[in-house]
Amino acid sequence: AQSVAQPEDQVNVAEGNPLTVKCTYSVSGNPYLFWYVQYPNRGLQFLLKYITGDNLVKGSYGFEAEFNKSQTSFHLKKPSALVSDSALYFCAVRDPYSGAGSYQLTFGKGTKLSVIP
Amino acid sequence: DAGITQSPRYKITETGRQVTLMCHQTWSHSYMFWYRQDLGHGLRLIYYSAAADITDKGEVPDGYVVSRSKTENFPLTLESATRSQTSVYFCASSEGQLGEKLFFGSGTQLSVL
């Protein structure tokens, strides 16, 4: 069964500093990985995804993520944090080789990012 | 407007009552999903649908019923609501390919008293 772990419930970072939100995953084969962001009282919005190819993927709002197969990680990063980046971030994984269940997208528990002015 | 809409936005009901949450998308996406969001659990999949008249269980299907008679609609019914079903419910849709992202509605906040 596929699973995702986000080891930090909350991450605090000063405005202008680099930020990292951690994610590790478990699937039987090669994963499809996603990051979503949720602002208060809103639905989730897609940030970026890794399907295949370059391990460093770039997404919306200056975010990027690095796929590391040996460490089964997909950490979200941004070089310089903004106060407006404060939100709840979710990592998600899909196992494309799991047959009928391939379309199930499993989410982590979320990490609350607070960017301090 | 194009997109995915959920209704109602907020709902308060009592234990034992039947409640239906509505979801409508205008993109003609093949796949639709229902998730619930709870503190400490993140998002958990309730049911999903690959096309009209095709539905399948997710991680937490007990106590819920879905139907999909038309591609654009995917209602979620709580047949006899329980307090443990108090949650925020999100509907989502995506195109048919596995690598495609999900588009989420704004959610329905349900309280069962």
Image (tube, grey):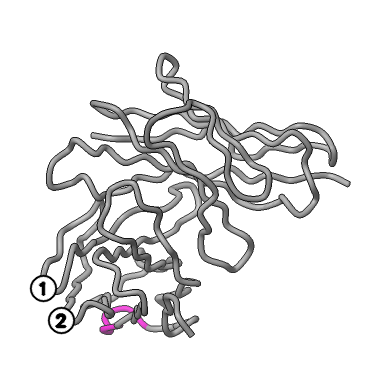
**Residue situated in front as seen by the camera: A32 or A57:** A57
**Measured Cα–Cα span from mark 2 to mark 1:** 6 Å
Residue A9 to residue A28: above or below: below
Tell me what residue is drawn at x 60 percent, y 51 percent.
A88
Dot 2, how many residues are within 10 Å of its Cα: few (below 14), some (14-19), or many (20+)? few
Tell me what residue is drawn at x 74 percent, y 33 percent.
A79
Residue A88 to residue A8: above or below: below
Asked whether disc 2 touches disc 1, contact meaning CB atoms under 8 Å apart, the reply is yes
Image position, residue A51 (x, y; %): 38, 37
Residue B92 found in image quarter: bottom left
Is residue B100 among the parts visible in the rendering? yes
User: Which residue bears the numbered disc 1?
Assistant: B53
**Residue situated in front as seen by the camera: A79 or B77:** A79
- Amino acid at circle 1: Asp
User: Which residue bears the numbered disc 2?
Assistant: B69
The span picked out in magenta is B14-19
Q: Secondary structure at mark 2?
A: loop
Query: What main secondary structure does the magenta stretch of the protein show?
Result: loop
